[in-house]
Amino acid sequence: MTMAVPFSLLLLALLLSLDLSPSAAAKNPTSPGDLVRSSCVHASYPTICLRTLSTYAGPAQTPAELAQAAVRVSLSRANKASGFLTTLRTSSKREAGVLSDCLSQMSDSVDELGRTLSELKHLRSGTFRWQMSNVETWVSAALTNEDTCLDGFKEVDGKVRSDVKRKITNVAKVTSNALYLINRLDQTRGKAGLRS
């Protein structure tokens, strides 16, 4: 003998089994790709943002994780650019001096981005404002260092200048996007992905 279960009872059971809480929605906004797309659309360099963060290993599930991923990309590119700068051969004292200054500025950028990543990994609701102020300052300083490096090469011509400009401009673009995502996280007050 089969028992007919009323449709309304089945519907109620289905609805009760779904987690429709705001925290569940914040943790998984449909898919990681949707989070990246919706977050990158207004970034300074949306195409670069989408390309670098869509292919980044370990898909971000929250805005905090996405900001961390953006800083990781920036840190990786800054490290690679610093390594590249050490391989360049200069043709004049002026060029060597500008390159040395740029190496120092990129080293500072790497340090600031490293501190930023460490801080983003330990965001807490009780100290969130203070932590966000720190990371915004550090990423802004990293971006300023990258821009200052480029400014130093304005009076230098040649292949070294074009090579440095290409590498550092790339780093500056991903750093600018990281700053945008950090500011976006700050505006949402880190609603998802924070520890108490």
Image: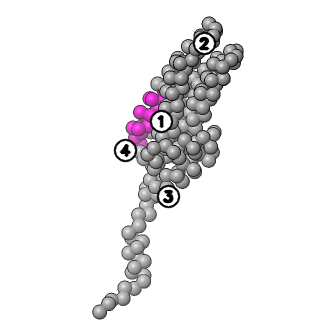
Per the model, the C-alpha gap separating discs 2 and 4 is: 52 Å
Mark 3 residue type:
Thr
What secondary structure is marked by label 3? loop
Q: Residues within 10 Å of mark 3 (few under 14, many from 20)?
A: few
Depth order, front residue of 54/32: 54
Q: Residue at x 56, y 13 (%)?
A: 100
- Residue 120 painted magenta: yes
Magenta stretch in the rendered image: 112-125
User: Which mark is nearer the camera, 4 or 1?
Assistant: 1
Q: Give the mark nearest the N terminus, 3 or 4.
A: 3
What secondary structure is marked by label 4? loop
Residue 3 bears which disc, if any?
A: none
Per the model, the C-alpha gap separating discs 4 and 1 is: 24 Å
Residue 30 bears which disc, if any?
A: 3
Per the model, the C-alpha gap separating discs 3 and 2 is: 51 Å
Residue 157 visible in the picture? yes
Percent coordinates x, y for residue 62 in the rendering? 46, 48
**Would you place residue 180 above or below residue 168 in this image?**
below
- Residue 51 painted magenta: no
Q: Residue at x 51, y 39 (%)?
A: 70
**Would you place residue 79 above or below residue 191 in this image?**
above
Q: Residue at x 63, y 39 (%)?
A: 44
Q: Which residue is mark 4?
A: 196
Percent coordinates x, y for residue 32 in the rendering? 49, 52
Cβ–Cβ under 8 Å for marks 2 and 4: no
Q: Which residue is mark 2?
A: 90
Percent coordinates x, y for residue 97 in the rendering? 59, 10
Q: Residues within 10 Å of mark 4 (few under 14, many from 20)?
A: few
